[in-house]
Amino acid sequence: MMKTLLLLVCTVFVSGFTLKGTDAIHKTVLKELVTELEAVLVNPPKETKAKEEIFLVDLEKKGSGMKCEHDYFCQAEEEMVKKVSGLSGVKFDPFRTDKKLMRNLNTYNHQDGKNCKKEIRSHSADEDQEEITLDVFLKDLLKCVKHVNSQKSPRPS
């Protein structure tokens, strides 16, 4: 009986510790995302010709709006992987999937066993979506990351 009670107390203690550790990891990933996004925005990729400007879906105006929710970050990752990560040149190096910015965004999207919904990804094929430039897209993403990071609970639902 005492062993069972001791085991129960230890389990509750350890689970509480794990949650605090998870919150710290969320905050660390978010802070690194802020740092990486700010670095890219200070020295954004410059297209060589105006015709080569990169446009991504405006996630704030998309559908019913996914402002700063888990689906927003999933769609942001999907947009950047599809339209920017595969581009060649030093100016697009921070957007490669093996670089810190994209790794942290992917890590954030898949923490707590959450995965990006397949139906969210399929919406990106819609041709009537409003689009914005890469620079504006990154500023919106940075604003969202900062907003989520400033909240008491670092994980949007």
Image: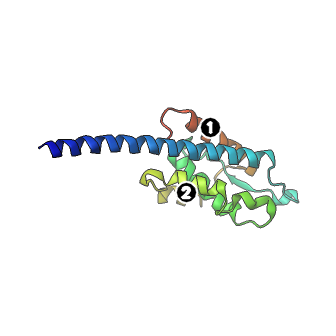
What amino acid is found at the position of numbered circle 2 in the picture? His
**Which residue occupies the extreme front position in the image?**
2
Tell me residue 129's x, y (percent): 64, 52
Tell me residue 126's x, y (percent): 60, 58
Q: Earlier in the sequence, mark 1 or mark 2?
A: 2
Q: Quadrant of the N terminus?
A: top left
**Quarter residue 148 falls in:** top right
Inspect this view and state whether residue 69 appears. no
Residue 2 position (above or below residue 94): above
Q: Are marks 1 and 2 in contact (CB under 8 Å)?
A: no
- Residue at the spot of label 2: 123
84 vs 101, nearest the viewer: 101
Tag 1, which secondary structure?
helix
Using a 10 Å C-alpha cutoff, classify the residue at mark 2 as few (fewer than 14 neighbours), some (14 to 19) or many (20 or more). Answer: few
**55 with respect to 153 (left or right):** right
Tag 2, which secondary structure?
helix
Residue 146's disc is 1
What amino acid is found at the position of numbered circle 1 in the picture? Lys
Residue appearing at x 80%, y 54% in the figure: 45
Q: Quadrant of the C terminus?
A: top left
**Which residue occupies the extreme left position in the image?**
1
**Quarter residue 13 falls in:** top left
33 vs 118, nearest the viewer: 33
Question: How many angstroms separate mark 1 from mark 2 (CA)?
Answer: 26 Å
